[in-house]
Image: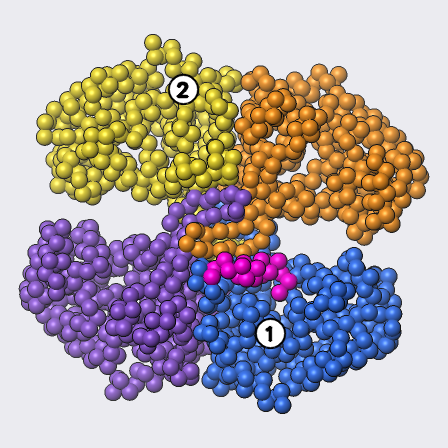
Chain colours: A blue, B orange, C yellow, D purple
Amino acid sequence: MLRVGLLGAGRIGQVHARTISQHPNSVLSAVSDAIEDSARTLAAAHRAEMRRSEDIIADPQIDAVLIATPTDTHSDLIETATAAGKAVLCEKPVDLDLARAMACQRVAAQNGQPVMIGFNRRFDPNFATLKASLQDGEIGAPELLAVTSFDPAPPPVSYIKVSGGLFRDMMIHDFDLSNYMMGALPETVSAVGTSVVDPEIAAAGDVDTAVVTMTYADGRIAVIKNSRRAVYGYDQRVEILGSGGLLQAQNVLEHTVVKSTADGVLSAKPTYFFLERYMAAYRAEWDAFVTAVTTGTQVPVTLEDGVAALAMAEAATRSARTGAPVRLEEILKPVAK
Amino acid sequence: MLRVGLLGAGRIGQVHARTISQHPNSVLSAVSDAIEDSARTLAAAHRAEMRRSEDIIADPQIDAVLIATPTDTHSDLIETATAAGKAVLCEKPVDLDLARAMACQRVAAQNGQPVMIGFNRRFDPNFATLKASLQDGEIGAPELLAVTSFDPAPPPVSYIKVSGGLFRDMMIHDFDLSNYMMGALPETVSAVGTSVVDPEIAAAGDVDTAVVTMTYADGRIAVIKNSRRAVYGYDQRVEILGSGGLLQAQNVLEHTVVKSTADGVLSAKPTYFFLERYMAAYRAEWDAFVTAVTTGTQVPVTLEDGVAALAMAEAATRSARTGAPVRLEEILKPVAK
Amino acid sequence: MLRVGLLGAGRIGQVHARTISQHPNSVLSAVSDAIEDSARTLAAAHRAEMRRSEDIIADPQIDAVLIATPTDTHSDLIETATAAGKAVLCEKPVDLDLARAMACQRVAAQNGQPVMIGFNRRFDPNFATLKASLQDGEIGAPELLAVTSFDPAPPPVSYIKVSGGLFRDMMIHDFDLSNYMMGALPETVSAVGTSVVDPEIAAAGDVDTAVVTMTYADGRIAVIKNSRRAVYGYDQRVEILGSGGLLQAQNVLEHTVVKSTADGVLSAKPTYFFLERYMAAYRAEWDAFVTAVTTGTQVPVTLEDGVAALAMAEAATRSARTGAPVRLEEILKPVAK
Amino acid sequence: MLRVGLLGAGRIGQVHARTISQHPNSVLSAVSDAIEDSARTLAAAHRAEMRRSEDIIADPQIDAVLIATPTDTHSDLIETATAAGKAVLCEKPVDLDLARAMACQRVAAQNGQPVMIGFNRRFDPNFATLKASLQDGEIGAPELLAVTSFDPAPPPVSYIKVSGGLFRDMMIHDFDLSNYMMGALPETVSAVGTSVVDPEIAAAGDVDTAVVTMTYADGRIAVIKNSRRAVYGYDQRVEILGSGGLLQAQNVLEHTVVKSTADGVLSAKPTYFFLERYMAAYRAEWDAFVTAVTTGTQVPVTLEDGVAALAMAEAATRSARTGAPVRLEEILKPVAK
């Protein structure tokens, strides 16, 4: 039974609390949050203790911590938790600053504890099914990946201002998903980003609509489309063309009822947002973490994966600014020194 | 917090145990089963006690019992449990014998405790969405209901012999669903049943493929198709034609991945069987029971509903034998005396 | 080059005129109609002559006639045309009177000319694809056939009064389609029919909504649903459950555009009515007739097929009235004497 | 009645011959081809004359010419035909050389005859439906266009060598479709192209897989994906995200039959290639040309449209080579001087 401390009691922390509690091999021991009331309420709901993060990390009775705090605390918490011998599951992104994330990666490697990054989409049953088909060679050699990822509505501009921008905050999921599907990092990243959804987003220095094209050493291509607004719901689709066919993961719909009237044939919308769409993914992600930690095997999404996605976001941000493609090694090398 | 005793620790009892435990307002206190080891294991998994059914029923600390025992014990257990002041959720069917079920209904009515019958499909989110559209008048006045309900594979012939036959064992769900959708009982029931799946089923005196047509006082028609075998999975579809359009509840698929190759475009099969398809329905059913009992409101599926579905199964069995349509009142009246 | 006389220049006659003209191996030579202006206009559009039916039939330069006149003239025209040595394609139904149709069948048999009945749906590319899959054993042995056939809107009540009723006028297509798919005639026919669409239809002595269930000697079952009104278009679906799976022919839609908005996901309706849906079928039907006649092979839909469908309509009409199932041999035998 | 001369009797010329003949307001008068036998056979099938191109163009009895000859003859034929007072429908592309195409545009403008370019996809009923929805504001302001366009199999390498490359030969259709959908030309064109389908294509100096991203003055973005090989058929999809929703034109399938077995649910593939997919488009295109010419209105796809698409192909070719985005005005201006 894995004893878990949860750092962060916000929206995503609450999701994780439930997942931890419902898993047969883990128990939620303690919860911390900068807002103590939030931690207290969440802890109470799961018969856990409200504690401070440093106390949770220092407690030898705690086996693992789940970091669901604001992004700018991730690197520090990963370092201190692994130093204290904890296994760590940390929400994405590792950091907004690539150099800091890479430094954290080195420290964690020295500390020798497993660190998994919460790229939940890898654990979505549909994407996992697609990946399995791909690995089984059902469409031969993959050639062209296309990811469509639209949020139903933009976050508040106040959030956007501290988010690191669309590429680091939103598309980072799609970068990781591309790495997962392609099984390799791209060589080049070309981005265009514009603001057509909300002029306040442009005023905040960010884009709300973007397309990124990536090329791979073996000639494969991936393209990611992002928009901050799809009024019909959370549009999350992946398709891969291969030498032997096409694989598509289509949207998950709210229900299966279809209504035919004189106006046409009306089906359900995609599920509204990530909590609805990816709840099964969060459970599978946690199960994968518990299994890896308790069996001593490699976690399925590493800190290195987190750094790679962040580097791609960095490359895309730069490319969107200059217009020119950016080689991923240009991003990774100077920083890695 | 509703304290619940579970009678029956078989496959469906295990489903209910989990549902009871996970509900925020109910707790599983005790489990009984004719096979004590089954009860013991299930009770242990939920920190409940293993007890005998009569002790559970007699215990004033228990608020409600969930009856998931063999069908021939249902009526007795409903009677004794309601006499002991328990609220009851009983699995379908109430009884294989209509007269016995009606007698039970009278006793339960005298005892004055809520008795809900476990017609889980009413709580399937898709069917509930369809029903809501219907009630909102989205397709005007309903005229023609069609239910397709195929099992993936027939049960063992040993089970079929004691099942009461396809109409009482399998189609009873579809009879209740028809009553739910149409909001009225049919006047006439016409059935044809044959055996084309397995000659052993015919040898056991049952059918494995059947179509039932029902007419209503206002001219509406319903038709139900059943087969014991659909090799592609559990086929559960409902459609209703109305003056303003058509509503269809389509199958729930295993995943959303679509593969296009030179052989065609391959999608996922329907979920395999009732545990996969109706897990959300079991949860919603239990929630509805807990809500009704704790708020003192009417349970949404009554013992009367259970008796009605059983009478329709009786009518269908008779019609399939004679070839002639059977008026439902012929079935209900003589027994009701 | 088959020289063809077209008898009847109404809506369906106009469809056939175009089909005849566009076929590389047939030419439209003459057109007749009780309303001479109609015949004249249609003939002119196809560089054909306007003539009287008897003159067309008597003309040795004409190889074949296509009968698209009112139903009560079909039998007479089939008899005189085959007596005159013409190959015949006659629109459905052969006759409203079964005895008359059977007498016509005997006369035509003596005359020895090919007579094909215009059950166009057999030639719909989708239904033909389904039939081919069935024959290739792709779902093993067929067990349960379901035909859904809804018109978009009822015809005028004046038409219904002379139509012979829903079973002879509308469901006759579905009876033939069932015979085509099942490859055998049913043993029993059970029908329910009501009027919920329009009380004037009931006042005219007809039904507008009906379900017919048929059983076969080997235990298979077929069920047909008809409604005179589906406001979303012409709903024409067939599905067959077999020992190895399910085959479905879904509706043909007006276009492939899908619109997702906050209101849901809107697709196109089925094509509106038979001219839109079955235009390709009419062309394939004519091609099959021309091929059979010019190569001296058997026409793919015989007068016997037309009589069988009519007998099933007769059986259904009787069953809907009495409530009891009707054995098809009861219908066929006394008449056949 | 428009009297038409057809220049070119190859595969696409044969399609046009049938379309011209079947149109009620046009007649095919003459056919030419470098291979006289081809012209003779095609002319005979349509009761037209076999003639030389220059004789057709010089003949005052001919109203219009349809140019379906090899690309390198297009500009010359457009110039001489318009000089001779003919209306012209010319297959795409106008030319492989942008400067030559622009010179041709100037000459044609002086000659004052209508010249339409055969971008058939604009006339596909599905794309036209999507465009109409867009114009009606059904998804608000368009923001992000995505075109997927995969051929079922690559052409022979011998063809690729003279084709002008993927961007000019294949993607040119998608450039025009983007212009049609967006109602504006892009400002920038960024392309990546690789060869993963066939190394011989790379050896011939071309790419077989490509993604082009385009930006517009108002911030909108378009992305086009091309592959020379999709083994499941001709994949032709368009989707546009707007402020009020998403419009998608999905593939046209070979039939509507769906087969469910233990292996999954199998639907039909997309229609195989352009002749199957776009036959209705060719008819609508010709009808639009005939209507414009006979009513003296503007043809719906102009020579200017053809030049614009060619310029975009030129920009994409250059961008794919350098990696940098290309501004469309850089392409259009120097040439236009």
Quarter of the image that includes the C terminus of chain B: top right
Q: Nearer the viewer, residue A143 or A66?
A: A143
Mark 1 surroundings within 10 Å by alpha-carbon count, few (fewer than 14), some (14 through 19), many (20 or more): many
At x 59%, y 33%, the residue is B228
Residue A156, horizontal then vertical, whole percent: 64, 74
Q: Secondary structure at mark 2?
A: helix
Q: Chain of mark 2?
A: C
| Left or right position of D325 against B206 | left
The image shows residue D171, relative to residue D336, as above or below, that is above
Q: Chain of mark 1?
A: A
Q: Secondary structure at mark 1?
A: helix
At x 13%, y 50%, the residue is D45
Looking at numbered disc 1 in the image, what kind of residue is underneath it?
Answer: Ile
Looking at numbered disc 2 in the image, what kind of residue is underneath it?
Answer: Glu
| Left or right position of C332 against B240 | left
Does residue B172 show up? no
Residue that badge 2 annotates:
C314
Circle number at residue A172: 1
Residue B52, horizontal then vertical, whole percent: 89, 36
| Left or right position of A262 against D78 | right
At x 66%, y 23%, the residue is B314
Highlighted magenta segment, given as a residue range: A122-140
